[in-house]
Image (cartoon, rainbow, N blue to C red):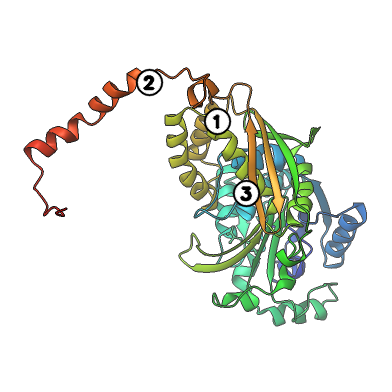
């Protein structure tokens, strides 16, 4: 029998009900742990204090808040940006990336409070249960994992009724049917009207992006500087990632850039309609990939781009703590040695585009590229090179190619 559980607590309906339900049904003491990964961009000390109080009101014996923003930015988000990680080509891993850092803190709290189990508030249909539980198995296989939401069989209305019965203060209501998860990488929105993939997302679900029609008429530019693949300053001001992302969200989101509407393949086999808004994250990946275009040697760049897809899948699938992700990061870090430089981003309604890039150790060689008088390219080398390049297919064509009916002039 579990005696004490550390619950990953968000302050939302399900995890608030879970605090009480675990005690009532399983007889365990509950320690609520809220991990700040930037889910509320304007959160202050009072915001987190209110979350703690709600946990106590739901019956927690202890409630703790950990500020993991800096760690999340520098040890998780930075890697994803270096990897240009976009799941199925579109989704910058918002929730997928935060679960492993939350898990680290769950384990630390379990040790601190002498708990024998940890719990999360994920349903049985999603990816987040996979990420929490696989991460927990690797970090602390001795801890039992409890998933109350997976077993209680409550509808949303049941949860609200349960909260009311036990006097648990909640802000949820039946007319807000969306499930939202957010952190400094962006917002993920599911359920409600968007479960029908034909329905256009209603404008009111967005918080970090404006509609294109409401974007400022004047365009602006901003400059992001990178060091070894990591964004380090914005418009000349040194800024750590966990601060740069909210700043960029505001700047880029105002122009209506950063929305993703997709049907994605969950790890558990379900196709799911998801809406994301990640203006800052998408702008940084765009800028980073562009800087790589002048700093990575051609073959390194091609090989890296093959791995980027697998990197995103590995993290999405809950395998952050795996030898494969570590090996990918080792390869990627070795490619980033000279990904140092600046990228100019141009913002106009609905668009964020790269309009300039420079790098001190870049591989772009003006003397080789120019068509003007300074040209240093050895034109005489080209004819022989091209002849040998085509020699193999020329031979094939002479000996084996079956003549296709040629178009007569
Ligand atoms: N589909 C996304 C993912 O698997 C987002 C999940 C968001 N979770 C949530 N509770 N709304 O990474």
Q: Mark 3 sits on what residue?
A: 97
Say which residue appears at 69% left-offset and 71% top-offset.
25
Q: Can residue 76 be seen in this view?
A: no
Point out the image quarter for the N terminus: bottom right
Q: Residue 395 at what x, y percent from top left?
A: 13, 32
Where residue 388 appears, as percent x and y from the top left, is: 23, 25
- Mark 2 vs 3, N-terminal side: 3
Q: Is residue 346 visible?
A: yes
Q: Nearer the viewer, residue 90 or 18?
A: 90
Gap in angstroms between the C-alphas marked 2 and 1: 23 Å
Pointer 1 residue:
294
Whether residue 164 sits left or right of residue 230 in the image: it is: right
Q: Nearer the viewer, residue 20 or 385?
A: 385
Query: Quick one: 372 or 308, which is closer to the camera?
Result: 372
Q: Measuring 70% from the left and 43% from the top, which residue is drawn there? A: 72
How many numbered marks, from 0 up?
Answer: 3
Which structural element holds mark 1? Answer: helix
- Which numbered disc, 2 or 1, marks the residue that appears first in the sequence? 1
Q: Which of 398 and 45 is in front in this view?
A: 398
Number of other residues with Cα within 10 Å of mark 1, as a class: few under 14, some 14 to 19, many 20 or more: many
- In the image as oriented, which residue stretches furthest toward the front? 409
Look at the numbered disc 3 and give the secondary structure of its residue. Answer: helix
Per the rendering, the mark at residue 379 is 2
Crowd class of label 2 (few under 14; some 14 to 19; many from 20; radius 10 Å):
few
Residues at marks 2 and 3, CA–CA distance in whole angstroms: 49 Å
Which one is earlier in the sequence, the residue at label 1 or at label 3? Answer: 3
Query: Please, is residue 185 above or below residue 371 in the view?
Result: below
* On screen, residue 286 above or below 333: below
Q: Is mark 3 within 8 Å of ligand 1?
A: no
């Amino acid at each position: 029998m579990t005696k004490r559980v550390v619950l990953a607590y968000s302050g939302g309906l399900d995890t608030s009900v879970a605090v009480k339900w675990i005690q009532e049904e399983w007889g365990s003491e509950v320690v609520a742990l809220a991990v700040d990964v930037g889910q509320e961009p304007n959160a202050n000390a009072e915001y987190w204090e209110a979350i703690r109080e709600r946990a106590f009101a739901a019956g927690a014996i202890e409630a703790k808040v950990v500020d993991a923003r800096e760690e999340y930015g520098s040890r998780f988000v930075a890697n994803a940006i270096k990897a240009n990680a976009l799941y199925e080509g579109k989704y910058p891993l918002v929730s997928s990336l935060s679960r492993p850092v939350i898990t680290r803190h769950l384990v630390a709290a379990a040790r601190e409070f002498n708990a024998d189990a940890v719990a999360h508030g994920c349903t049985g249909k999603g990816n987040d249960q996979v990420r929490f539980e696989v991460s927990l198995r690797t970090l602390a296989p001795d801890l039992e994992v409890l998933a109350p939401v997976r077993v209680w069989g409550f509808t949303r209305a049941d949860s609200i009724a349960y909260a009311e019965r036990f006097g648990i203060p909640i802000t949820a209501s039946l007319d807000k049917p969306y499930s939202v998860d957010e952190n400094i990488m962006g917002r993920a929105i599911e359920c409600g009207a968007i479960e029908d993939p034909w329905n256009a997302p209603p404008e009111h679900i967005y918080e970090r992006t404006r509609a294109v029609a409401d974007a400022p008429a004047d365009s602006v530019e901003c400059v992001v500087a990178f060091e070894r693949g990591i964004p380090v300053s914005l418009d000349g001001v040194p800024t750590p990632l966990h601060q740069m992302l909210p700043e960029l969200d505001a700047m880029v989101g105002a122009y209506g850039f950063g929305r993703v509407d997709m049907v994605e393949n969950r790890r558990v086999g379900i196709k799911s309609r998801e809406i994301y808004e990640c203006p800052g994250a998408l702008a940084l990946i765009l800028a980073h990939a562009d800087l790589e275009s002048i700093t990575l040697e051609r073959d390194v760049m091609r090989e890296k781009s093959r791995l980027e897809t697998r990197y995103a899948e590995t993290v999405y699938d809950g395998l952050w703590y795996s030898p494969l992700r570590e090996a990918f990061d080792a390869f990627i870090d070795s490619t980033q040695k000279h990904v140092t430089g600046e990228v100019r981003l141009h913002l106009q309604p609905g668009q964020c585009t790269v309009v300039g890039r420079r790098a001190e150790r870049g591989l772009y060689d003006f003397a080789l590229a120019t068509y003007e008088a300074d040209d240093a390219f050895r034109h005489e080398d080209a004819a022989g090179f091209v002849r040998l390049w085509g020699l193999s297919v020329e031979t094939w064509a002479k000996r084996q190619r079956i003549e296709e009916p040629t178009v007569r002039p």
